[in-house]
Image (cartoon, grey):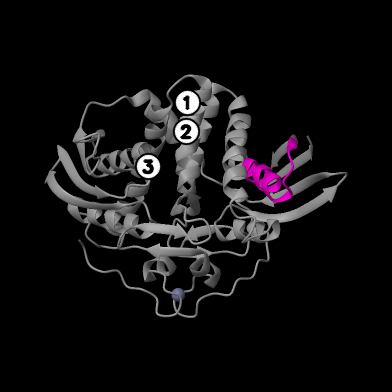
Amino acid sequence: MAEKRVICTVCGLPRGIGRGNAWHPNGVITATYPPHIRGTLYDVDELNTLFPAISKRIGFDITRLVIEGKRNDGRRYADSLIRNRTEQGKGAAPLDIYSLISHFSAYWGLGLSEITEYEEGERLTLSVTNPYSDPMCRGDWSGVFEAVEKKRGEASWRDEDVRDVMDIVAVAGEPELETRIEQEVELGIPFKEEGDLQYRYCSECGVPLEISHQFKWDADRSLVVEVISGKRFMLHNTNGIVAVLRVLREELGAEIDRMITEISRIYASDYYSHLLEGSSMDAELMKFPLRSWGRVARLHHRDGGYRVRVVNPYCAPVVAGRLWGLTEAFTERDFALAGVDEDEGALDVALSPA
Ligand SMILES: [Zn+2]
């Protein structure tokens, strides 16, 4: 495999994580360099549960929409990388861009991808290990291919059963869907500066020390594992997932939010029910901002129910479901969702006794 990645001697995280990302007092992670794209530490199982569960509930396979959303996200990311490097007078040759993105992906926990074959304007072949998601990974690389080659790329596994070799091949485009998703991606995720969170930062790499306590971050295998649960996580930009959800809302109606919240609730309820011994409701809520899920600004327990306010949620319906399932798991009671309000970068969730 490629070179060993440099590890921080103080906290043990890969050095590239601190170089490339900043943890802010408002509960948000952004890239260190312009355009300061927001990132999120995603629970990979939660994401991989979400999209099939939606397909099952609505009786329509949304895989294609997920791939399309990620394709545009990947293209936008690669486009800005190419632009930045060109402006800085650095190389933006196709193989340089592919290698760089493969390098970053390893750091972020998206999986290892090694370029094995390349035919300019025609085809890119990658040897892939530990991909975080089949459709999202294919979408990411199709978009990168598109940015570099200026041609639409279609990604598929050479062997569907093994899924270790991915071919991205130039094909004719479908401009209509692309244009719409592109606009959604452009909308991005606004966030407020409000917040006074204080972290103890690593003196060498600058990442909050708490991150190195919560995660085993192995960039050589591209695996970020949450110590307490053994679950895989990844650091990926926030826009792509949210853009996919926005498109789903347009295609399938506003009920999709409620559906996502219910799916996330079931996932979270199960996830936190395994942490009752080693953690607490407060301890878990404190982890939200470190993952760029948002900052819990208020938590009221009244009349047997709960009201929670999160500033800068990375994706309101998912975070609402998390809060719902988390509360149920730690109180060992069922709650009804009495209200979800999203307004100007803040999410208010009300839970009442079921
Ligand atoms: Zn460090």
Category of crowding for the residue at label 1, using alpha-carbon neighbours closer than 10 angstroms: few (below 14), some (14–19), many (at least 20): few
Q: Which residue is drawn at 52% across and 56% down?
A: 229
Magenta part, dominant SS: helix
First-in-chain label (1 vs 3)? 1
Mark pair 1, 3: CA separation: 16 Å
4 falls in the magenta region: no
Q: Is mark 1 on a helix, strand or loop?
A: helix
| Residue 321 x %, y % | 63, 40
Badge 3 density bin: few <14, some 14–19, many ≥20, Cα 10 Å: some
Above or below, 178 against 38 in this view is: above
| Residue 1 higher or lower than 113, as above or below | below
Image coords of residue 241 (percent x, y): 47, 41
Disc 1 vs disc 3: Cβ atoms closer than 8 Å? no
Q: Does the residue labelled 3 lie within 8 Å of ligand 1?
A: no
Q: Residues within 10 Å of mark 2 (few under 14, many from 20)?
A: some
Residue at figure coordinates x 41%, y 73% from the top left:
12
Q: In which quarter of the image is ligand 1?
A: bottom left
Name the residue beneath numbered marker 2. 51
Residue where numbered disc 1 is placed: 55
**CB of mark 1 near ligand 1 (< 8 Å):** no
Q: Residue 133 has which mark?
A: 3
Q: Residue 340's spot in the image, x, y percent? A: 71, 37
Q: Which residue is situated farthest in the right direction here?
A: 303
Question: Residue drawn 40% across and 80% down?
Answer: 9
Relative side of 248 to 346, left or right: left
Q: Are marks 1 and 2 in contact (CB under 8 Å)?
A: yes
**Is the residue 94 above or below the residue 11 in the image?**
above
Taking the image as shown, residue 192 lies to the left or right of residue 35, namely right
Quadrant for residue 24, please give it.
Answer: bottom right
Instruction: Tell me, yes or no, if residue 128 can be seen here.
Output: yes
